[in-house]
Image (tube, rainbow, N blue to C red):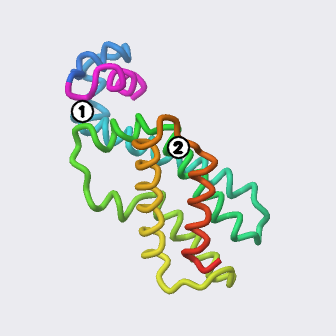
């Protein structure tokens, strides 16, 4: 996957052949097809890698917050999702925007949203906030964060991460009534 990622960054998905990927990975073409049936499959795997990396950053940051500080947990989620996205935005764009057609499912059901749903449910159970539909709030917050990061990336020469994450944290907190 590393060879595919490197080549996709350098040449683009459409211009990269499976033969280039296998050559770059120093594996036989048959080995590629043991794991992937097409470039689309490797793009899906790169998308999974992106999401798992961002989720790992989120989980690590939340683990460092005090156990019952739900405000800090939610702020850590927002900050690390946004910065994780920015840190790997090129991988995101290759995996999700280059040749695969984006689906609605990816914006309503993914491991990042699922983690946020669980965080919102846990905070509600601990009476840190009161929300009626954690899934709806999580989908709303995830997509709002996604769009805000995209907007900052498009409209700013160099994204001001502190300003962006400060604003996102306030939006997340106000969305749960804090």
| Tag shown at residue 53 | 2
Q: Is residue 3 above or below residue 45?
A: above
Depicted 13 relative to depicted 126: above or below: above
**Location of the C terminus (image quadrant):** bottom right
- In the rendering, at what x and y percent does residue 146 appear? 43, 54
Residue 26: which disc? none
Q: Residue at x 56, y 67 (%)?
A: 171
Element under label 1? helix
Instruction: Count residues near mark 2 (Cα–Cα under 10 Å), then give few for <14, some for 14-19, many for 20+.
Output: some
Write the start and end of the magenta stretch as one range.
1-14
Q: Name the residue furthest right.
A: 66
Q: Is residue 11 above or below residue 82?
A: above
In this orientation, which residue lies closer to the viewer: 129 or 152? 152
Q: Nearer the viewer, residue 7 or 19?
A: 7
Q: Helix, strand, or loop for circle 2?
A: helix
In the image, is 126 to the left or to the right of 104?
Answer: right
Question: Looking at the image, is mark 1 or mark 2 earlier in the sequence?
Answer: 1
Q: What secondary structure characterizes most of the magenta part?
A: helix
Q: Is residue 105 left or right of residue 53?
A: left
- Disc 1 residue crowd, few under 14, some 14–19, many 20+, Cα 10 Å: some
Quarter of the picture containing the N terminus is top left
Q: How many marks?
A: 2
Q: Is residue 95 left or right of residue 40?
A: right
Quarter-of-image position of residue 108? bottom left
Residue 89 drawn at (x, y percent):
44, 39
Q: Which residue is mark 1?
A: 39
Reply above or below: 77 against 28: below
């Amino acid at each position: 996957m590393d060879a595919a990622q490197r080549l996709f960054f350098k040449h683009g998905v459409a211009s990269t052949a499976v033969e280039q990927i296998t050559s770059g990975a120093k594996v036989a073409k048959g080995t590629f097809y043991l794991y992937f049936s097409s470039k689309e499959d490797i793009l899906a795997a790169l998308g999974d890698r992106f999401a798992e990396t961002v989720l790992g950053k989120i989980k690590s940051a939340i683990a460092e917050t005090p156990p019952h500080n739900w405000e800090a947990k939610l702020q850590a989620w927002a900050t690390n999702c946004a910065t994780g996205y920015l840190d790997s935005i090129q991988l995101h764009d290759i995996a999700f925007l280059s040749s695969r057609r984006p689906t609605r499912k990816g914006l309503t059901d993914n491991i990042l949203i699922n983690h946020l749903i669980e965080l919102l449910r846990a905070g509600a159970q601990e009476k840190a906030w009161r929300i009626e539909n954690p899934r709806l709030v999580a989908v709303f917050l995830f997509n709002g964060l996604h769009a805000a990061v995209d907007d900052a990336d498009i409209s700013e020469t160099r994204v001001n991460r502190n300003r962006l994450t400060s604003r996102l944290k306030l939006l997340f907190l106000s969305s749960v009534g804090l």
